[in-house]
Amino acid sequence: MDLTREYFNHLERGYDSADLERSVATERFMASVFRPDIVCRDFQGLQAYMDQWEKYTTFHQELTFALKTLRLVETDADQRCAVTVYANGELNVTFTQDTLKFLYPTLWQEREMVETLVGSRGCLPIEMALHFDCQGRVFAFESRVNLVSTLLQVLHSPSAAIHALEASIMTADGHWQVRQDDEEAARRERLLPRPLL
């Protein structure tokens, strides 16, 4: 559980590879705790994982990431898994023009929506399950980001929140979409332990 707390500490301000002072320490920690071939439903590999964090960080402003709760989960069903840590946290961000241009591309032309979202602060509730192998390294993870509640909080309209969610390039698991290959997605799914989220 200490490694999960440290994970939140390293990413409390996100990850930006251009910020060498912080990024080197974060990269070193991640390489020591996460396997290079880490897998989730949407992508595989530590670099792809860090790319997700970089998108959250660079396409928003004032990102903060905080741990709320932490607990161990029984994992008898998968022999690869020595322990699974379940964590709840919050990711707070300020929406920018880049947020909308790159992460909500179809909203970019909707002036009223852009004016409402740009400069708004949102709190994204996050659930995570980190699956550790017998060597103490994370080999798989699950996550869920509740974007719709954040959009509802900012936009004050269920229909506007749903419209913005549908315009985002976020997957159901809270990742920014990467090019998908159905065969590759099925292979990744087979590599995952039994889903908790």
Image (cartoon, grey):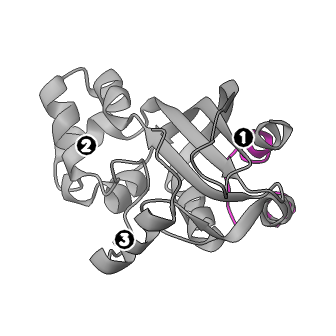
Query: How far across and how far down the image is residue 168, in percent?
Result: 28, 52
| Viewer-proximal residue among 89 and 168 | 89
- For label 3, the residue is 185
Q: In the picture, residue 106 is in which quadrant?
A: bottom left
Identify the residue shown where x is 27% and y is 44%.
114
Residue 180 location, quadrant: bottom left
Question: Circle 2 is placed at which residue position?
Answer: 165
Callout 1, which amino acid? Glu
Answer few, some or many: residues within 10 Å of disc 3's Cα (few below 14, many 20 plus, some between 14 and 19): some
| Start-end of magenta stretch | 7-23
The mark nearer the N terminus, 1 or 2, is 1
Q: Is residue 125 in the magenta section?
A: no
Q: Is residue 19 visible?
A: no
**Mark 1 highlights which residue?**
12
Element assignment for label 1: loop
Discs 3/1, front = 3
Pinpoint residue 142: horizontal percent, then vertical percent. 52, 48
Residue 25 in sight here: yes
Check residue 195 in the rendering and tell me which mark sits there, or answer none.
none
Q: Nearer the viewer, residue 1 or 176?
A: 1
Q: Residue 108 location in percent, x, y?
A: 24, 55
- The local crowd at label 1, few if under 14, some if 14 to 19, many if 20 or more residues have their Cα within 10 Å, is some
Return the disc, 2 or 3, that comes first in the chain's sequence: 2
Q: Quadrant of residue 29?
A: bottom right
Give the spatial CA distance, label 1 vs label 2: 25 Å
Q: CA distance from mark 2 to mark 3?
A: 22 Å
Which amino acid does the dot numbered 2 rest on? Leu
